Amino acid sequence: MDRADGQRASASGRPSRNRLYLLPQELIDMNQHHLNALGVGHASLDQLCRVTMARGLHSKLTGAGGGGCGITLLKPGLERPEVEATKQALTGCGFDCWETSVGAPGVSVHSAASLDGPVRQALGGL
């Protein structure tokens, strides 16, 4: 369904799941450019970005400080053959590939009463 602003929305009126990935994709690209401008990029990571961008995917160096690691955001609905073809292209360039997922619950709030006695004691008697 088209909205007045020209964006696509799902039947519920919310933006589609693919649409929600547009901002993270743009931010990944911007961040990678900023990291390169700061001089912390590397030619091999630029190659990773070119390989994945050619397949419509977005990558950046992780910035974890270990050197030489990048991440690629896989959009919803990406078919397994597309993932495998991208991994094959990357391994052909000498990269190792690992798949993981995001979407854990994140921060949780627990009441002090839910903690067992020794934990409460260790936290100063909550």
Image (cartoon, rainbow, N blue to C red):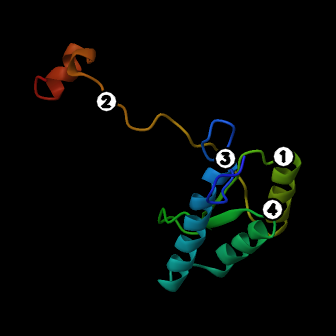
Q: Amino acid at mark 4?
A: Thr
Residue at 61%, 79% in the rendered image: 42
N-term-proximal mark, 1 vs 4: 1
Q: Is residue 45 left or right of residue 116?
A: right
Q: Is residue 31 above or below residue 57?
A: below
- Mark closest to the chain's N terminus, 2 or 4: 4
- Name which residue type carries label 3: Ala
Circle 3 sits on which residue? 9
Name the outermost residue toward the left: 125
Which residue is labeled 4 in the image?
91
Name which residue type carries label 2. Val
Relative to residue 101, is residue 52 depicted above or below? below
Q: Which residue is mark 1?
A: 79
Identify the element where label 3 is drawn. Answer: loop
Crowding at label 1, few (<14), some or many (≥20) Cα neighbours within 10 Å? Answer: few
Residue 17 relative to residue 78: left or right: left
Label 2: which secondary element: loop
What is the number of the mark on residue 109?
Answer: 2
Q: Which mark's residue is nearer the viewer, 3 or 4?
A: 3
